[in-house]
Image (cartoon, rainbow, N blue to C red):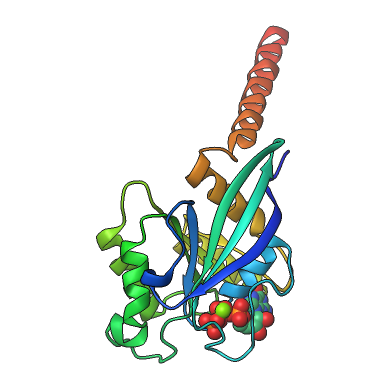
């Protein structure tokens, strides 16, 4: 099965706000989430580059809006996508107003940036019910456009045992779980990115599914013929 791969990735620019951001001439995937959840690490894992986005054990490492241009290769076709690494929001446990915990500039950016096609909201698998994350999700749902998609991705899944992983998947059925430490879970994120922006990337699954169904019905027919 062919999996989409990033074959090129380069840092383009850091911006303070939407006003000094790049022209809106390319589809963008934004990585948002609490400080330290693993936004920069996830971007590095997806592009298979160790230090493309700066990550750190100290929260608050990313302070600007960082743009990266990437190119996917999938079934011998090339697909350009821009990745946007954002500063994290709120470190405090108590939920304050969004604007207090996440600077006004960022709120403006995610709300008004036309080129955003996919919001990847990263949540810490160990704290799946954090209030601030629920608030951000509700907030984005107020203005998300029909051509945009919202995806919940849980990071640090390596910190959970099997039972906890099962519960997380039951509680958040549409979500993806991954580990940047163990380097797993990223293929589904690639598929979502290509599918959202270019409507490709999942065909292989479908044709595989179809083949299985065909195979099954042939087997059943054969069984029927025998019996
Ligand atoms: N165990 C584990 N650690 C992770 C994972 N992803 C990231 N980390 C660690 O979490 C810390 C924070 O990672 P970053 O990628 O810098 O987080 P960030 O969300 O970009 O943080 P800010 O830029 O401060 O908002 C680093 O020490 C990473 O090594 C993961 O999947 N598993
Ligand atoms: Mg960061």
Residue 87 percent across, percent down from the top left: 48, 79
Left or right, 47 with reference to 167: right
Residue 200 percent across, percent down from the top left: 56, 38
Q: What residue is drawn where x is 54% and y is 82%? A: 62
Asked whether residue 36 appears in the rendered view, the answer is no
Q: In which quarter of the image is the N terminus?
A: top right
Residue 30 percent across, percent down from the top left: 48, 64
Vertically, is 133 above or below 78? below
Vertically, is 59 above or below 220? below
Left or right, 59 with reference to 150: right
Q: What residue is drawn where x is 29% and y is 82%? A: 99
- Residue in front for this viewpoint, 222 or 58: 58
Asked whether residue 76 appears in the rendered view, the answer is yes
Q: In which quarter of the image is the C terminus?
A: top right
| Residue with the most extreme top position | 225
Q: What residue is drawn where x is 54% and y is 57%? A: 82
């Amino acid at each position: 099965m062919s999996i989409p791969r990033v074959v090129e990735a380069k840092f383009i620019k850091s911006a303070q706000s939407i006003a000094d951001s790049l022209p809106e001439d390319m589809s963008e995937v934004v990585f948002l989430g609490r400080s330290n959840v693993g936004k920069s690490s996830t971007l590095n894992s997806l592009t298979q580059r160790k230090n493309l986005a700066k990550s750190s054990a100290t929260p608050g490492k990313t302070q600007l809006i960082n743009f990266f241009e990437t190119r996917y290769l999938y079934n011998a076709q090339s697909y350009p996508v821009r990745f946007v690494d954002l500063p994290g929001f709120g470190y405090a446990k108590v939920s304050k107003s969004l604007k207090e915990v996440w600077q006004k500039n960022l709120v403006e950016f995610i709300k008004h940036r036309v080129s955003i096609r996919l919001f990847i909201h990263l949540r810490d698998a160990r704290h799946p019910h954090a209030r601030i994350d629920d608030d951000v999700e509700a907030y984005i749902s107020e203005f998300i456009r029909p051509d945009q998609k919202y995806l919940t991705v849980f990071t640090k899944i390596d910190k959970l045992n099997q039972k906890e992983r099962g519960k997380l998947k039951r509680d958040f059925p549409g979500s993806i779980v991954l580990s940047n430490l163990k380097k797993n879970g990223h293929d589904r994120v690639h598929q979502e990115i290509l599918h959202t922006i270019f409507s490709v990337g999942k065909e292989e699954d479908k044709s595989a599914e179809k083949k299985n169904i065909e195979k099954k019905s042939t087997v059943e027919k054969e069984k029927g013929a025998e019996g």
